[in-house]
Amino acid sequence: MSAPRFLALVLAGLIALFAGFNLFTGVVLDSVRLDLTERGLYRLSPGTLEVLERIEEPVQLDFVYSREEAARYPAIRAYAARVREMLRTIAARSDGMVRLDEVDPEPFSPAEDRAIAAGLEPVPTEEGGQLFFGLIGHNAVDDRRTVAFFDPAEEARLEYEIVRLIAELDRARTPVIAVISSLPFAPDAQGASPNPVIDELAAAYDLVWLDETFEAIPEADALFLLHPPALTEAQTYLVDQFALRTGRVLAALDPMAHVALKPGPDGLPPLRAERDSALPRLLPAWGAAYDPTVVAMDRRHGLPVQINEGGRTRMRAYPLWFSVPPGGMSTGFPPVAALSRGVNVGSPGVLRPLEGAATAFSAILATSPEGARLDADLAAGSPSPDELAAIYQIAPDAPLALAARLSGPLASAFPDGPPAGELALDPAAHRARSDGAAEIILIADADLFDPAFFINPDPVQGDRIVADNLALILNLADALAGDPALVSLRSRSSSARPMVRVEDLRAEAEARYLALQEELSAELAAAEAELEALNRTGAGSALSGAAAAETGQAEALRARILEARERLRDIERGFRVEIDALERALLFWTVWVPPVLVLLAGFVFLLLRRRRPR
């Protein structure tokens, strides 16, 4: 055999071997994944595996993605690769119960028509086209669910969005949640609510809203009391019997609900707005105590608010509005144990267990050990941070419970049967005790439903979720009425790697800057006040006949004022220079130094190799 023919045969054999190896690995090793990322970004959660294992009928997923339109947007392209890999991993781990297709809808094609008809939301591109980036799922009976658009800003919820879609297609019916609330959250005629938490709940559950005059509670998987109005005796009895019958109740009470008093489009608070809420007869029967005249505050985790002091705008921590970090959450209760960003609350109430109660009281959200109590009427006056600091007294029983889980058998709050008079209630249907262990969640705050507490609006990059308020409520809904397997999925890590060290150093520099600024501002204000007093008495100028000593004092004060203002400007410049220098240093050490070291190492290795004796 000639050499050229032999070489051709070898090349053909290598190509065939390469193709065969790829086919083999594609078939045999398709479900094998090795995730080496630090946060396990490509590793499926136990909740996902649980949902996949119990699928009874095949689910079809159509990943709708406009490749050509997305080619001009690197961020979308990169996120699409992440979504595609997640979908493939889910399909590979489902034993054939999840089937995946990718659809690239061409303009004016039947595929584009089907995507629009299914409810996908195309994004217009700069070139005038439409970018589809969503998911359509349907089951054997053609029930359909969609992810309208995969938003890269919601990467942490990617696995949850996909698995929730699969779980909803697999379940026999949509769970029902009955809602009693005085907050203006009920959806309008088009089904849209002014609150994103309610919108998310409505997407997963069938919400049944009861008005203030309700005379019955329909059959439901759970009952949500969201800052409820004052209930009549008969209505309280209906809630009591629902809790005994199903054992699934979530109650959000608040001694100072800012969200209830929030002005509407007309600039006025809603009619019949309730500042506080309570369930005075039910909570003792459930085993908890709550005082609607007291709010909690926490100076250690106060949220920054913008205030005006001496004509200067600055940010100050506000103890009445604070964050509950992961350290203040229960680690033994999955709906909160999985949260990582903290929950923001506004002047919440305080809960405590009742002695001798049959239920077990477990705090699931609590203040830091520096938590304090404040009269709700004082909190309603919006005191300044300085006023709060002056009266702040750490509670001897801190940390204070802000939310709690009550579990165990319940006894009726109406041991003598239904109240007489208001409604025709059947005494024969009265339940004195629950059949099994109840699961009741109490939250002493309604403001956590307010998007202002957990969404940071950004007109350029879009709204950004900064706290886990939404995830908390959805997790609790899943724990009480829905699919507990979804609870662990809402707080997966994002692939974004923030420069934590930079942020920490920036915070330290800002703290130093604020401390110096406050010191100088106080000195400046004192000098200005002293000079103003001299001017009022005519002692600040020689033209008004002031003595030399007095005019000298005024001149010294003016010099102090000018010096203080100059030092303030220096501090502001120094802060910016320090941060810029830090970022330049990190850029140098992380971007330039590693490749330079690699080049140097290569050069040294080459030099040593050449000098090695042959």
Image: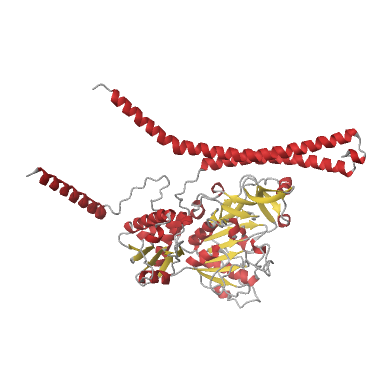
Task: Evaluate whether residue 170 shows in this view.
Answer: no
Looking at the picture, the colour scheme in use is secondary structure
Q: In the displayed image of the protein, which residue is found farthest to the right?
A: 545
Image quadrant where residue 161 sits: bottom left
Q: Quadrant of residue 228?
A: bottom right
On screen, 463 above or below 209?
above
Is residue 526 left or right of 196 when viewed as pictured? Answer: right
| Vertical comparison of 482 with 24: above or below | below
Q: Could you tell me how many numbered marks the image carries?
A: 0
In this view, the residue in front, 282 or 324, is 324
In this rendering, position of residue 117 left or right of residue 328: left
Q: Position of residue 408 (x, y in %)?
A: 53, 58
188 or 231, which lies in front?
188
Q: Position of residue 226 (x, y in %)?
A: 59, 64
Identified at 58% across, 59% down, the residue is 451
Is the C terminus in the top left, top right, bottom left or bottom right quadrant? top left
Pick whichever, 34 or 507, lies toward us: 507
Extreme-bottom residue of the structure: 424
Report which quarter residue 253 is drawn in: bottom right
Q: Residue at x 55, y 37 (%)?
A: 581
Residue drawn at point x = 80 percent, y = 42 percent: 528
Q: Position of residue 507 (x, y in %)?
A: 59, 42
Would you say 341 lies left or right of 518 here?
A: left
Q: Closer to the camera, 350 or 530?
A: 530
Q: Residue furthest left?
A: 1
> Picture coordinates of residue 39 (x, y %)?
43, 47
Does the rendering let one see residue 25?
yes
